Image (cartoon, rainbow, N blue to C red):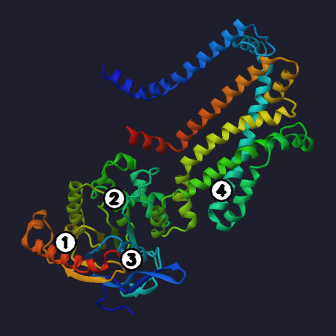
Amino acid sequence: MVEATAPKIELRGIRKSFQLGRGQVRPVLDDIAFSAQPGEFVAVIGPSGCGKSTMFNIMAGLETASSGEILVDGVVVTGQREHFAYMPQKDLLFPWRSILENTSLGLEVAGQSKKTARARAASLFAAFGLSGFEHAHPFELSGGMRQRAALLRTVVQDRDVLLLDEPFGALDSITRTDMQSWLQGVWSQNAWTAVLITHDIREAIYLADRVVVLSARPASVRLDLTIDLPRPRELSMTTSAEFAGYERTLLAALHEETPTHRGA
Amino acid sequence: MKNNVTVKWALAPRIVALSALVPPAVILVALVIVWQLAVTVGEVQPAILPSPLRILQQGWGARAAIWENTLPTLQETFLGFAVSLTVAWTLAILIDFSPWLRRALMPLLVASQTIPIIAIAPLMVIWFGFGMFPKIIVIALVTFFPVTVGLIDGFNRTDRDAINLLRSMGANRWKQFVYVRLPSALPSFFTALRIGIAYAVTGAIFAEYVGAERGLGIYMAMMKNSFRTDLVLAAVAVTAVVSVCLFLLTYAAERAIVPWHSKERRSRHG
């Protein structure tokens, strides 16, 4: 049963708790629910350790939820891996593979011939600013280039939804700003549906169509805020009054319940 | 002129590597000189402690016999080590894929290392004779353990996030092994290989010492029995040179098989 206006991806009542032994249970995710329309960019922010990465692992099919379902195009796909392309925090480019071999890894693993996989990845090198680095090795690249290569490896898999787990967290702030404006540019030229985990409120507002705020553990959705800034986004927008307004709202949502949970 | 500069740069790492050999060479030469002086001044009997010069002279005189006995030792070392590597890779891969086998085999592997080779080697001669077979077993027995443990450890050293990335791409256990676990394990494999090869030559010598037709071990035993201490020590020197050469060979192999490892290391330190 496919609904006519089904979102690209929808999370319904995702709960997860870890068994600590001796009957003790630690709840991590408490009824997480949000969705993303086709081509929508959704950012998820929350206090550190709130279970964002667990949520991603459940979406990517790497961990199983205690309850709840994940739908893609209105169809339940909980636990299936083939719908999501996952970009972890670390670039995880393998030193024994060239950049081209690294970026085509997902296609190769999926069973495509090396030749087809590499040709497919190579066709994206220009758009990712990596031309001429096909045969370089990861240690020869700057942090920003490594991150772009990791993103290329993610999008080339042609999955329904991109899961980006703090992709720019390890970069210095100048490189990070460059990467954000670059990502904003390539994203607006493609119809990717993306979910981004970040600690950076400004990054969330700048890149996303909607920002989902999670509470501290056990995480639940505290706020689902639509960012109504025009696209393409310019860096100058980050100093506008509107931008500052979103920042205030998100800061308030993030911190409103922190005192009661602190030290828990 | 410009070309010269490039050549110099290209040679630079090699010069650095050679200069690393200078300090040990200085100490070695100093020790040999002290030894030579002590023997000459103290008029020590050559049968008790020959001078380095005498070892060199007599060893050179007996070079045909020494060479003839070095070849079988080398052959045993290679064959024994080949068996050892085959066993180590098989065990390590089985253990990597099966937690049950890990629990079953690890204690047995550790126990195998408590076998006193010194007691077993003579029995091997009784069981299997003076040929090559018992030597291969002894060498394999003393070297497979460090290599196996090094490999298992290397497989386990794989970044968990890298495994998760592969899983998210849909890789099954075998593909995870081929694409990440195996390449991740290679650096620690080569470390283990160096430990293994160092034991392999001494293992071969020892296995021959208790009984063999030919080989450096039995040559040393026979020279000792005829009080030719100088030739025993000449054979010891040859053993040391052979061991060092094999040791250096592992670095060459590492460079050929894992070129990214040394390149990455250099870029991180340079």
Q: CA distance from mark 1 to mark 2?
A: 30 Å
Q: Is residue A135 visible?
A: no
Q: CA distance from mark 3 to mark 2?
A: 32 Å
Q: Is residue B255 visible?
A: yes
- Disc 2 is placed on an element classified as loop
Q: Are marks 4 and 3 on the same chain?
A: no
The amino acid sitting under disc 1 is Ile
10 Å neighbourhood of mark 4: few (<14), some, or many (≥20)?
many
Q: Is residue A12 left or right of residue B91?
A: left
Identify the chain of the residue marked 1, using the numbered disc in the image. A
If the image is split into quadrants, where does the N terminus of chain B sit?
Answer: top left
The amino acid sitting under disc 3 is Met
Considering depth in this image, is B167 or B16 the residue closer to the camera?
A: B16
Q: Position of residue B213 (x, y in %)?
A: 88, 31
If the image is split into quadrants, where does the C terminus of chain B sit?
Answer: top left
Residue for badge 1: A205
Residue for badge 4: B92
Q: CA distance from mark 4 to mark 3?
A: 34 Å
Q: Is residue A135 above or below residue A59?
A: above
Looking at the image, is mark 3 or mark 2 nearer the viewer? 3
Q: Position of residue A76 (x, y in %)?
A: 42, 86
Q: Earlier in the sequence, mark 1 or mark 2?
A: 2
Residue for badge 2: A123
Give the quadrant of residue A260. bottom left
The amino acid sitting under disc 2 is Ser
